[in-house]
Amino acid sequence: MKPEPEKLLETIAGKLMVEIAPNVQPSYRQSSVLLTALLLGMVREEWDRAAARRVEENSALRTIFASAAPSVADAELRKRLEAAASSRDESYRVSALETANTSLRALLIDLHAHVEAQSAPWARAVEELIWRELAASTERRRFMLAPF
Amino acid sequence: MEELAPRIAAYAAEKLPGARDVTAFDVERIAGGASRETYRFKLRFREGAREVERRLILRRDPPGSLIETDRAAEFAAYRAFHGSAVPVPEAVWLESDPRWLDYPFFVMEELVGFEASPQAIVMPPYAEHAERTAREKWTILGAIASADPEKLGLTRALPVVAPADAWRREVDYWTHVIDEDELAPQPIIRAAIRRLRRSPPPPPRRLHVVHGDYRTGNFLYDKDGSIRGILDWEMAHLGDPLEDLAWSLNRTWCWARDGRVGGLVSKERAIAIWEAASGLRADPEALRWWELFSSVKAQAIWISSGREYTDGANKDPILALSSVWLTNSQDRAMLETMGKLS
């Protein structure tokens, strides 16, 4: 696709902000145009990284599950962790990667709650891995214009 | 918007039986909070030999909103503080019958000529008055905290909770919102909620009025940095005053992106102003609990706005923007409060 989607979104957002919004009245509609331009800017930022961040994150979560599974006594949870750890991203379409990511993050919540309730050293080690991954996940999702 | 004008005039005529020739005009929708549709308009009528013109604000419930709130509570809060050290516009009419304007609404006085934008406050000419704005902002919040809800009549308008249960009611409510509205699993917010429940804060000595959304963006200020009106009371309730203080300090409102809370002053300075004004002490541990809670609540609102937009109940771009732009910042704020931001 040429021009590239990033270029298109950047140009359209710029036009909305600089040329169109100032000529739109009343102020509520003008504000809607400006907000739409900001949104397009974020879509542009997300478009380039959408697949990469999901592939990276899905892989990181599977690694945590593989590391935790042998120590988890809860048979049902262990089975889910083993299954998730051995799964793979079969398609790199963003929708398919997102479906896998949703399922993996749901399992992460269950694992996190489980290890918080355990006092053994392995649980603390897994908890540390989880926190590190959660911090990394927010870095992957950051927007240039984020307030924090 | 002009189709609203005759309907507003008909309603006003009903509420002003002594008035003649009631007309509403210059009806304009404005960006005034995402939880209700906000319009400014002028109302003109004759009262005896006198012609009266008032500039008013209409806040109408939309089909879908960012925050599902009780307009009666908001109206009561405006009424309670009008004429006090907490500057608020006069609340005029509250109407729950949808026959007038399709949805429930209330009308209040318009405070004209002031700025509300959180982006403008960090830029000239307003930025040079940051210290004064901050002093007024947290002094007013201190006045809200030190107010007696019983004397203000707010214990009749807002649900009363035992002080020891104030934290639980808030956590339960916002957890429910997240359970209902989340579009994807949220590991950070779930960890934060578990932490909040594991170590509750000490209860306040008594119930206080909590504004519920006290932040830069929800007050009007003038060119000299003076605060002229506290708005957006739609989440007002009774509870722990540290809830409001923590909300005002939330990282997401650091509009200057330099760590100054509300885009104004350091966190320590804001707390010191509030303590002096309220006569209360912000216990650091308890405040940290409420700061984490404030991120959970804010995240619940961003999640909710994403849900409203996705389901099509409300296609206002502010809902999509809130969800897309702020969710990650809020996650980072939660990690920081929990000491987990690397």
Image (tube, rainbow, N blue to C red):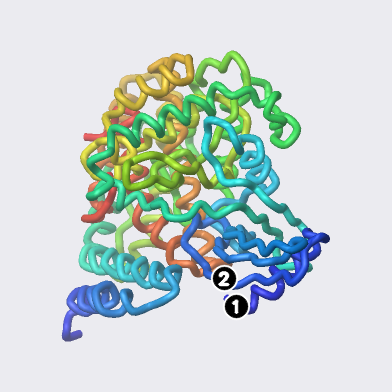
At label 1, which amino acid type do we have?
Glu
Position above or below: B73 against B313: above
Quadrant of the image for the N terminus of chain A? bottom left
Occupied quadrant, residue B285: top left
Q: Is residue B148 left or right of residue A139?
A: right
Please, which chain is the residue tagged with disc 1 on? B
For residue B2, the mark is 1
Q: Is residue B94 left or right of residue A124?
A: right
> Looking at the image, is mark 2 or mark 1 earlier in the sequence?
1
- What kind of element bears circle 2? strand
At label 2, which amino acid type do we have?
Val
Q: How many marks?
A: 2
On the image, numbered disc 2 is attached to which residue?
Answer: B27
Which residue is drawn at the image coordinates 39% and 72% (left, top)?
Answer: A30
Few, some or many residues within 10 Å of mark 2 (<14, 14–19, 20+): many
Image x and y of residue B182, in percent: 50, 53
Few, some or many residues within 10 Å of mark 1 (<14, 14–19, 20+): few
